[in-house]
Amino acid sequence: MSRRCSLTGKQVQFGHNVSHSNRKTNRRFQVNLQKVSLVSEALGRAVPLRVSTRALRTVQKRGGLDAFLLGTDDARLPELARRLKRRIQKRMEARG
């Protein structure tokens, strides 16, 4: 399983440790991923996801999972989030 956020697509970045003598060695900047279950009001159930803590804060700020996905452009979402967004939109249209 890749270390990638399910909602934002944020993933591992690479860089260097730089010593006092300016020697550069490779390192990885890991994403702070958490396994959470976010409640979707449109679907009426909790959706288990691996989400970065930054994305979790953004979801809470925007007012929940449904509001976050519906307010975010499809080009900025990974495939899993786009599928979830389409399911939420279909459910919202069915309710009228």
Image (tube, helix red, strand yellow):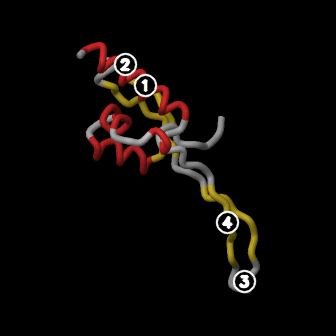
Residue 51 is at least partly visible in this image: no
Q: Secondary structure at mark 1?
A: helix
- The first of marks 4 and 3 along the sequence is 4
**x, y percentage for residue 71?**
33, 40
Label pair 1/2, CB-CB below 8 angstroms: yes
Whole-Å distance between the Cαs marked 3 and 2? 56 Å
**x, y percentage for residue 67?**
30, 36
Whole-Å distance between the Cαs marked 3 and 1? 50 Å
Residue 32 is at least partly visible in this image: yes
Q: Which residue is mark 3?
A: 22
Q: Secondary structure at mark 3?
A: loop
Say if 76 sits above or below 92 in the image.
below
Amino acid tagged 4: Gly
Mark 3 neighbour density, 10 Å: few (under 14) some (14–19) many (20 or more): few
Say if 59 sits above or below 40 in the image.
below
**Mark 2 or mark 4: which is in front?**
2
Q: Which residue is mark 2?
A: 90
- The first of marks 2 and 4 along the sequence is 4
Mark 1 neighbour density, 10 Å: few (under 14) some (14–19) many (20 or more): some
Q: How many marks?
A: 4
What residue lies at 58% left-to-right and 43% top-to-bottom? 4
**Residue 41 in the figure: left or right of residue 24:** left
Q: Which residue is mark 1?
A: 86
**Mark 4 or mark 1: which is in front?**
1
**x, y percentage for residue 72?**
39, 42
What is the number of the mark on residue 15? 4
Whole-Å distance between the Cαs marked 4 and 1? 36 Å
Amino acid tagged 2: Lys
Amino acid tagged 3: Asn
- The first of marks 3 and 2 along the sequence is 3
